[in-house]
Each structure stands twice: as C-alpha cells, then as structure tokens.
Amino acid sequence: MRIVRILAILLAIIVGTSLCGCVKDNKSEANELIKMLPSDYKGFVYVNFKNIENSKYASEYRSKILNSLGLRNANGEKTGIYINKTKRMLISENGYNRIIFIIEGDYDFDKFKKHLKETGMKSVEYEGFKIYTKTSDGRLALTFYKDMIIAGTKQGVYECIDVIKGKRDSLLKNKEVMEIYDKLPSDACVMSVTIGYNPWYKTIGEGMSITLKNDHRVKVVRVEKYKDEETAKEKYEELLKEKEKHEEEMKKKGISGDVKLDGQYLITDSVITVFLSLLVLYNTL
C-alpha cells in the first residue's frame, strides 16, 4: 500500500536527522492542513519538513517522498518547484477516486504555472480556484492555495476546495479520526491516522507518530483501537507477556517501551536507537 511505503520513507527521514528536534506543539501546524480535508476521509499522513531543513539528508528524502507520490524529481530551474524548499506535506484518501496531496513550499508558482501550460495542461475555474488537468488523463488534477499545491484525483481536489470554501465539513470534525489523533503526542514530527478494519492487527483504527530525541534515539508511539474494551484488554495482556518475555533482549538492543490500556485503545510508546530504526526500516521494505 502506498501510504505504508511513505511511512517507511518518513522513518528514514527521522533516522537521518535525529539531532534536529521537533517543535513542541506540532499539532497546531498540522491542524492548519488537516482542516482542509473532507470530514469523511479515512485519515492522513502528515510530515513537517521544516524540522529537518538543517540536515544534509533533507533534500534527498524530500525527493524520495515526492517521487513516491508520482510527482517525480522536479527540475527547479525549469518548473519552479525546488525540492529542498518543501516545508510541509499531508496525504489523505478515501477510495480510488478520492485522493488528496497538500504540499507546501517556497516555490516559484508563476514559473510552475507557465510550465504546466507548456506541457499541455488545461485549466478550468471553480470557486475562484484554477484547476489544472491533463487532457490525456482527466482523473488527476492540481490547483494552488496560498503557498501550497493541492494535487490528487480530480474529485479529491474539488472536495478539498469545497472544504476551504466552507461548503463541506472538515476532517477535524470526524470524531473517529480525531479520537486517535488526540492520543498522539503533540511534539511529533510525523503523524498518521487510519480508520477502518485491519485484518492483520484486528483493529478498527490505528495511529502512529515519530518524535525525534536528542540522544540519537527515536520515540515511536502507536495507537490501536479495537472493537470493544474486552478485545483491547486481551491484546494488552498478550503484549505485556511478550514484553516480559523479551525484556532482557530489548535492553541489549537499546529498546525501552511502555504499554498502556485506555478503554478500547492500546497505546505503545517505544524509544529505540537510530541504528535499530534503520534495521526496522529495511525489514519493512
């Protein structure tokens, strides 16, 4: 699944920049983008690139993520889209035809718009926005808002505009998504939330966040929501047994963790070394 791949790449970003640190309240910035998503979407992945701008890895990983989104490596001199000037990104979806990418950056939008015309992109007006589409593929579209590119499927882009214009409710009003989001730490640099049944974990909702530590360590918080408190308690007890069984091994590998039961929710909080984070990433891929 594309979002799983993106999360793996984001973990690589965090590993490569673990000394840069996260802002104390990243959720207030995340909310600025989340409020642009329709209320019936199934979650999101958010990353704040501004927290890694001092790292030598920043441009490389920005490029990898944009490539994974199918945007390719932009030629800044030609398009005005400079990869190393990407600041924030949000991804959300609800089915094949409802996908939204919001990418914020210090781009040369006039140059990019000129490039779009030169490549044969057509535009139409909607609610004061100019929406660009390819004549060869009418399913995909993009538009501009402040210093952001809103891209994705045509339906997704139109729905995002409807939210901005107040014609649709925002994802911030989605109780299922926000309950999981609220349980993630506010200082996280990367946050993701997904609602819906996961047959692998048997959850009905999941969340994950990554927070940078200043001692070459990474904190990963995972939130799992189960169908009822009884199921959550069963999973909690299973996890406690596993933790006790492997406690010595975890210490040797530099892993510390905590497990918390909160009604239907199971919350794990792990701090792992940068080296181990890389191993986890490679095993995931």
Image (tube, helix red, strand yellow):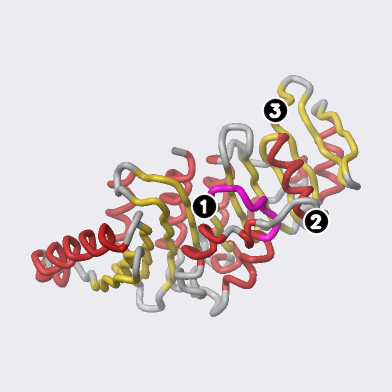
Say what secondary structure mark 1 lies in.
helix
- Real-space CA distance between mark 1 and mark 3, rounded to the nearest whole angstrom: 27 Å
The amino acid pointed to by label 3 is: Arg
Q: Would you identify the image quadrant in which residue 235 lies?
A: bottom left
Q: Nearer the viewer, mark 3 or mark 2?
A: 2
Residue labelled with disc 2: 166
Q: Amino acid at mark 1?
A: Tyr
Residue 37: give x, y in percent of width and height. 67, 53
Residue name at image x 33 percent, y 58 percent: 228
The region drawn magenta spans: 35-42
Is disc 3 placed on a helix, strand or loop? strand
Task: Label 2, secondary structure: give it.
Answer: loop
Distance of label 3 from label 2 (alpha carbons): 24 Å
Q: As drawn, is 201 to the left or to the right of 166?
A: left
Disc on the earlier residue, 1 or 3: 1
Asked whether, in this view, residue 170 is left or right of residue 7, the answer is right
Quadrant for the C terminus, please: top left
Q: Residues within 10 Å of mark 1 (few under 14, many from 20)?
A: many
Mark 2 Cα within 10 Å, few/some/many (few <14, many 20+)? few
Instruction: For label 3, count other residues whose C-alpha is less than 10 Å away and answer few (under 14), some (14-19) or many (20+).
Output: some
Residue of label 1: 61
Q: Check the image and report above or below for 249 versus 151.
A: below
The amino acid marked with disc number 2 is: Gly
Give the percent coordinates (x, y) of residue 128. Answer: 91, 47
User: What residue sits right under mark 3 in the picture?
Assistant: 139
Q: Earlier in the sequence, mark 1 or mark 2?
A: 1
Mark number, residue 262: none
Q: Position of residue 246 (x, y in %)?
A: 11, 64
User: Mark 3 or 2 closer to N-term?
Assistant: 3
Which part of the image, by quadrant, shows the N terminus?
Answer: top left
Q: Position of residue 93 (x, y in %)?
A: 58, 43
